[in-house]
Image: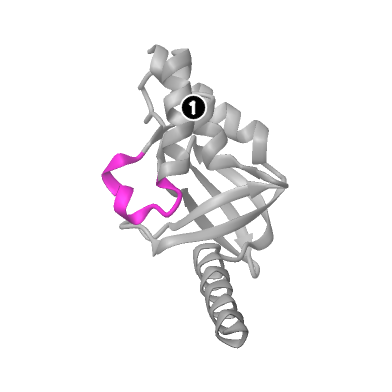
């Protein structure tokens, strides 16, 4: 009986560990941010080549929309000329060929920060393709409650 219980315990713990490993993707980097295009798009250098990043799971205002400039300026302040780490989402590239990534500056998930402080909305259109959708959505609920950023427009 003890042997069976021991085997069952090992089986359960290995299943749990396997799920964590599958859910957490490795971070790549560091990469230097050389340009900020808008509130959810930036350029980085990977192996001597400029790559354009689209921040996965979020959407910031477009030019001539309320809070566009604030979102772009905040992103510049956060990451321009700094080294970041990136994490691939479920899809590698979007329809315009940009890398779809979660962006980390030290331990800060920039995608979530932009949502939490009202610079971005969660991109609900791609919720089934966004691995951190529920995490981002929780941050958005708080920004809506506080009526900040894009939610005050």
Residue 69 drawn at (x, y percent): 49, 23
Horizontal and vertical percent position of residue 49: 59, 66
- Residue tagged 1: 119
Q: Is residue 48 or residue 75 the one in the foreground?
A: 75
Badge 1 marks a residue whose secondary structure is loop
Residue 48 belongs to the span the image colors magenta: no
The one of 18 and 114 positioned closer to us in this rendering: 18
Which span is picked out in magenta?
Answer: 123-133
Majority SS type along the magenta span = helix
Q: Percent from the top left, x then y, of residue 42?
A: 53, 46
Residue at 55% across, 62% down: 24
Residue at 39 percent across and 17 percent down: it is 151
In percent of the image, x 53 and y 73: which residue is there? 12
Tell me the residue at 73%/47% (across/down): 106
Which residue is outermost to the left?
125
3 versus 126 height, above or below: below
Q: How many marks?
A: 1
Residue at the extreme bottom? 3
């Amino acid at each position: 009986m003890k042997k069976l219980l021991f085997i069952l315990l090992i089986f359960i713990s290995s299943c749990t560990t396997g799920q964590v490993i599958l859910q957490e993707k490795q971070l790549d980097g560091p990469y230097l941010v050389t340009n900020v295009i808008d509130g959810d798009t930036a350029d980085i250098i990977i192996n001597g080549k400029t790559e354009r990043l689209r921040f996965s799971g979020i959407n910031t205002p477009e030019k001539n929309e309320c809070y566009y400039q604030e979102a772009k300026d905040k992103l510049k302040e956060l990451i321009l000329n700094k080294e970041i780490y990136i994490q691939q989402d479920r899809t590698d590239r979007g329809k315009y060929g940009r890398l779809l990534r979660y962006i980390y500056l030290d331990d800060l998930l920039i995608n979530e920060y932009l949502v939490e402080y009202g610079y971005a909305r969660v991109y609900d259109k791609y919720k089934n393709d966004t691995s951190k959708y529920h995490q981002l959505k929780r941050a958005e609920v708080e920004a809506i409650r506080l009526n900040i950023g894009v939610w005050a427009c």
